[in-house]
């Protein structure tokens, strides 16, 4: 298609890869962010987030002079809003960044322009929030200014591949808006692009993540039931999933990230009397850090140790640096409030509370090692040495990630979330007998 000038507002985990993708496919792109540190890094062909191959793509885009960073928007053919949409403490959508971004482009939009909201938002946001702001431009929406929603559907760690390969939904305030937005994304999207209205597109995005959140809640509830029953949830799930029409998800310490832990609340906010299952699923998943802390209390009991806990991994998922809505961050807070000394080590993330400079520092003199995130790097740990550093010699695997027999050979008493109990006092007695 003809070369366009595209203004992308928000240079986070979605905005920056999207801006770089458009730029490397021939468009002139202005990447806008209120954080000068992010803009300066971009203009020096560097990135401030961790995502495979993104640094190479950004370098190519900047070197071609098709991508530059700015703290202010400017006139363009297309405006893409990809700013954060967090939730407040009372579980409501915080739309201030969308509002600020929309207001910032009003002076720059011109007849024939396209405005796309990519930020995940409660259904009705384009209609009730974005459009009234854009009407201040004096342009007729749907005739002189084309508006819609096209949500991303990518997985951190595979963003670049999935931006290109995944199917995409485009919702427009009218048919011509949807078609014009589709033409823009056809620049690099190889998957199918399906057209609908803007509110349907918004609902599709939040429901896709809600589907997963509800299924994880079912797995987490099953883990609690198996603990009470005295059986192994992982064996139950493995066998259940042999059924051709069953696919139980995996349990864990909770659900994190900007999508799964947030998007279901957008539906609950708009439909509080109807979204009962969705709300209960969110509450179940949000309860898991407390459930894990209770399990730690139960295992340690009235220990005479210093009550230091070593936590491995704080990001919301494996092999990324993203800590947004991480349940492990919540777990650290819960443990701290209960009087534990917590030391956490993560080879991907930096600048979090209780950060240890090394694995050795985190593990030294700890009563328990808790595997919070299934980073591949953790499989390379020398567990015999790790066990030697600890006092309690208990390993609590929240992801069923480690080889239990290997941990036991190294000297650990092993507990896996959802699969029985470890009696620390009994473990101490056995150690003394040896």
Image: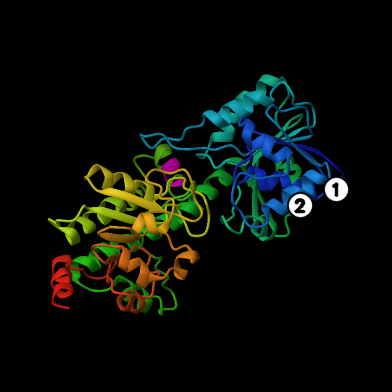
Q: Is residue 302 left or right of residue 30?
A: left
Magenta highlight range: 263-267
Of 185 and 180, the residue lying toward us: 185
CA distance separating discs 1 and 2:
9 Å
Residue 253 visible within the image: no
The C terminus appears in which quarter of the rendering?
A: bottom left
Principal secondary structure, stretch drawn in magenta: helix
- The residue under the point 52% across, 46% down is 203
Quadrant housing residue 252: bottom left
Q: Which residue of the protein is positioned furthest toward the right in this rendering?
A: 2
Task: Reply above or below: 37 against 222.
Answer: above
Q: Which mark is residue 186?
A: 2
Looking at the picture, how far across and down is residue 217, in whole percent?
35, 57
Q: Are marks 1 and 2 in contact (CB under 8 Å)?
A: yes
Looking at the picture, how far across and down is residue 5, in whole percent?
80, 37
Q: Earlier in the sequence, mark 1 or mark 2?
A: 1
Task: Reply above or below: 123 against 385.
Answer: above
- The residue under the point 47% across, 32% down is 94
Dot 2 alpha-carbon crowd within 10 angstroms: few under 14, some 14 to 19, many 20 or more: some
Q: Badge 1 is on which residue? A: 1
- Residue 391 shown in magenta: no
Q: Secondary structure at mark 2?
A: loop
């Amino acid at each position: 298609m003809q070369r366009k000038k595209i203004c992308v507002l928000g240079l986070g985990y979605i905005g920056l890869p999207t801006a770089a993708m458009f730029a490397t496919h021939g468009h002139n792109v202005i990447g806008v962010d209120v954080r000068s540190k992010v803009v300066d890094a971009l203009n020096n062909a560097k990135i401030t987030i961790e995502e495979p191959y993104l640094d190479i793509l950004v370098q190519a885009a900047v070197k071609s002079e098709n991508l530059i960073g700015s703290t202010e928007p400017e006139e363009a053919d297309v405006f893409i809003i990809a700013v954060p949409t967090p939730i407040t403490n009372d579980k409501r959508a915080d739309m201030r960044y969308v509002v600020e971004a929309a207001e910032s482009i009003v002076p720059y939009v011109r007849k024939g322009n396209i405005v796309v909201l990519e930020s995940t938002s409660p259904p009705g946001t384009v209609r009730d929030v974005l459009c009234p702001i854009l009407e201040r431009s004096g342009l007729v929406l749907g005739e002189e200014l084309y508006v819609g929603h096209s949500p991303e559907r990518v997985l951190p760690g595979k963003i670049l591949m999935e931006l290109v390969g995944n199917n995409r939904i485009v919702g427009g305030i009218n048919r011509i808006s949807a078609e014009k937005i589709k033409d823009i994304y056809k620049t690099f999207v190889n998957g199918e692009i399906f057209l609908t209205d803007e509110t349907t597109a918004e609902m599709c995005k939040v429901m896709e993540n809600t589907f997963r959140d509800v299924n994880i809640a079912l797995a987490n509830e099953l883990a609690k039931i198996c603990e009470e029953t005295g059986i192994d949830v992982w064996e139950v799930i493995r066998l259940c999933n042999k059924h051709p029409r069953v696919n139980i998800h995996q349990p864990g310490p909770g659900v994190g990230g900007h999508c799964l832990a947030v998007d279901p609340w957008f539906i609950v906010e708009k439909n509080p009397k109807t979204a009962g299952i969705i709300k209960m699923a969110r509450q179940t998943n949000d309860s898991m850090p407390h459930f894990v802390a209770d399990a730690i209390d139960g295992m340690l009991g009235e220990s005479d140790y210093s009550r230091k806990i070593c936590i491995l991994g704080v990001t919301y998922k494996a092999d990324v640096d993203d800590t947004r809505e991480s349940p492990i961050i919540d777990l650290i807070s819960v443990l701290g409030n209960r009087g534990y000394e917590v030391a956490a080590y993560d080879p991907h993330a930096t600048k979090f509370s209780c950060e240890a400079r090394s694995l050795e520092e985190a593990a030294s003199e700890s009563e328990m090692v808790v595997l919070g995130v299934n980073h591949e790097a953790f499989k390379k740990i020398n567990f015999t040495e790790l066990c030697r550093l600890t006092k309690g010699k208990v390993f609590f695997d929240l992801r069923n990630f480690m080889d239990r027999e290997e941990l036991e050979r190294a000297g650990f008493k092993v507990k896996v979330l959802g699969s029985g109990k470890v009696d620390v006092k009994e473990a101490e007695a056995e150690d003394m007998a040896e």
